[in-house]
Amino acid sequence: MSGPSPVSQLRVEQVTHSYGRTTVVRDVSLDVEAGQVHCLLGPSGSGKSTLLRVIAGLETPDSGVVSIGSVQVTGKQISVRPEQRAIGFVFQDYALFPHLNVQRNILYGMPRGTRAERHDKVNSLLERVELADAASAMPHTLSGGEQQRVALARALAREPAVMLLDEPFSSLDVRLRAEVRETTLRVLREFNTATLMVTHDPQESMRCADLVSVIRAGQIIQTATPQDLYFFPADRETAETFGPVNTLKVRQEGSQRVTTLGSLPGPVALDNLNKTALLRPECIALEPAPNATADNHGIVRTIEPEGGTTLIGVQLSQGPLVQARCLAPGNWCIGAVVRVRLRNPWGESNPGDNASAH
């Protein structure tokens, strides 16, 4: 017998918002549960930051409903003021008060309590975000990563049910980004906060999220786990957002769906409009075949080292150029003849991972 369904801390239902005659958010619905990190992924101008502002109460939508827990905060003839919503907001530029030190930044907007209680809470939050010795520091003396963590502590000081993060790591360098991201996600999960994070970076959404919603031109195209988005994208544009994808024509032969490389190995993403399969490089297997004469062979045309893996581009003898991802190092060389076949990325290793082809 299954347990009760998780309760959504944030629910957005059929929200539409326009600026003049331009609709920037169109009929958007999503749910975020307590302790869950949900990423809203899309390019600039896709409507993702506008949706955050609607949720926060900084914009009034044309239609739709926003609820925090069981309380409707936006809806028909309902608009709860931003400061009365159980929401924390971390902006892209952190929005710290430059004339206040770290402690006073965090105290700003904190619920009432005794002086001792409030200062104890500040100290506890600073410990959580690994800035225990920074209470008296001014914002301009802190690094970008430290400022981001102060902004997070200030937002958490309000004890929000929902946290909104607007491109929180985009201004940090690669090393700092990983460090601050790890701290931020750890703290949010410790507080069991429902988190909606906006980003334009597909890799960041994959690393951070329990669920990702892809937004395009103001509409949600697909909501899924990072793994399902990667292997089962809704369409080719979504597929290409997350990295290289092979497209092979599909024909039906009885109960089998067949491509130039043989039958599809289990469930795969299909572009029904163009009758093609959308296959990641992990779904292509390569084997050395210097004397191959079968139809499913090809010639290595490109080799792209990726660190722990190598992306191999192979021109099929009867078909397009496809890409396979193999473990590095691989002794592949341009011009080598290889056998190419489809594989189930969950059920087998790539035979080419330890192979040589010259």
Image: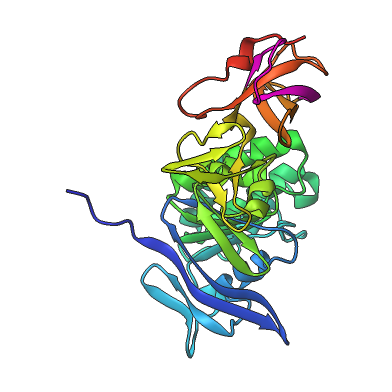
Q: Position of residue 216 (x, y in %)?
A: 66, 63
**Residue 298 is inside the magenta segment:** yes
Name the foreground residue: 314 vs 253. 253
**Residue 209 is inside the magenta segment:** no
Q: Going by the image, does 267 lie left or right of 245?
A: left
Q: Position of residue 193 (x, y in %)?
A: 46, 54
Q: Position of residue 6 (x, y in %)?
A: 33, 56
Answer above or below: position of 339 versus 8: above
Q: Going by the image, does 319 lie left or right of 33?
A: right
Q: Going by the image, does 94 lie left or right of 68?
A: right
Q: Residue at x 47, y 67 (%)?
A: 86
Name the foreground residue: 90 vs 96. 90
Q: Residue at x 48, y 33 (%)?
A: 265
Q: Going by the image, does 99 lie left or right of 227?
A: right
Count of all numbered marks drawn on residues in the image: 0
User: In the image, which residues are magenta?
Assistant: 286-304
Answer above or below: position of 165 versus 219: above
Q: Position of residue 87 (x, y in %)?
A: 52, 65
What quarter of the picture does the C terminus occupy? top right
Colouring scheme, one of rainbow, by chain, secondary structure, one colour: rainbow
Q: In which quarter of the image is residue 142?
A: top right
Q: Which residue is drawn at 71% across and 13% down?
A: 330
In this view of the protein, can residue 155 be seen by the observer?
A: yes
Name the foreground residue: 232 vs 209. 232
Q: Which residue is drawn at 59% across and 85% down?
A: 62
